[in-house]
Amino acid sequence: MIEFDHVTKRYGGVNAIDRVCLRLPDHGIHCLLGRNGAGKTTWMKLLAGHIGATSGAITVDGRPVSPGRMPESVNYIESGVTQFNLRVSELMAAAADLQQGFDQGFAQEMADRLELDRRKRFKQLSFGMRTMLTTIIALANSSRAILLDEPTLGFDAIMRQQFNDLLLQSHQAHPRLIVVSTHLIDEIAKVTERLIVIDRGRVLLQAGIDQVDELAYSLSGPTAAVQPLLAGLNVIGRTSAGALTTAQIYDHRITPPPGVVLERLSLQDFFINLVGGGTHV
């Protein structure tokens, strides 16, 4: 069990992480969403023990986390991380030698499926293939928690699909906690189980994807018909144009009257309204 207990990380006068309280289970694929500068990377580095909190406590299985007590069970992979300029085959062999419980069969299978040329050296690979190789090595190790920070930067559409398949197969082979930070919101929704939304250093939401799918929707129609329906609902965004209004909701579903249309919100539209929504006339 991972727990953040009123954790704050301050840089100068700015709180990159602001009094975060959060618990994470031992397994599942989680998506960490936030705007640029929201605190996603800081949150991951705090959990991995790469940086220390200004206040509050972080624990993994009840043990405190800090730069002096980095948890061996948590593996943080930063976007654009480099490797020694060895051949692909040599890097995977070195990882197997250094990491107890490294699943070399899984690593080799994934490398073959993604058509990684094992004879090439790391610097000969494209940026996307370098990232994919690093991700394979991370997912093949025996860490109980894997933190992937923007792993799909530089990926084309096919590679993003391959990455999602890689996540699923890794979790099926070795159930554990995987947290992925990404801006490709609707694509990661296909594989993630839970969502964590962070904004300005604070956690706005921690919920299952099924819950978000059920509770996030919009109501569109004449303003005179839509407005009365919003009383008591959690409205996260609203747009009015002339006599028409569209409201974005995160709450229980209602049955709208004739003339008012209810539509589910995509995960991306939900995120945009949750962190940057408001009333627009």
Image (cartoon, rainbow, N blue to C red):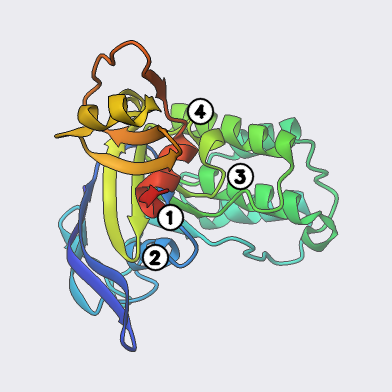
Q: Name, please, the residue furthest toward the top.
A: 258
Which residue is at the front of the view, 191 or 139? Answer: 191
Q: Residue at x 21, y 68 (%)?
A: 7
Disc nearer the start of the sequence (4/1) = 1
Q: Is residue 21 visible?
A: yes
Mark 3, secondary structure of its residue? helix
* Residue identified by numbered label 2: 39
Identity, as a three-letter code, of the amino acid under mark 2? Gly
Identity, as a three-letter code, of the amino acid under mark 1? Gly
The spot of residue 121 in percent (x, y) is 82, 58
Q: What is the spatial separation of the Cα atoms under label 3 and label 4, in whole angstroms?
A: 19 Å
Q: Residue at x 29, y 24 (%)?
A: 225
Which residue is at the front of the view, 268 or 236? Answer: 236
* Residue identified by numbered label 3: 136
Disc nearer the start of the sequence (2/3) = 2
Which residue is at the front of the view, 103 or 218? Answer: 218
The spot of residue 21 in percent (x, y) is 18, 57
Above-or-below relation of 38 to 266: below
Task: Determine whether, in the image, residue 7 is placed left or right of residue 189.
Answer: left
Q: Is residue 73 visible?
A: no
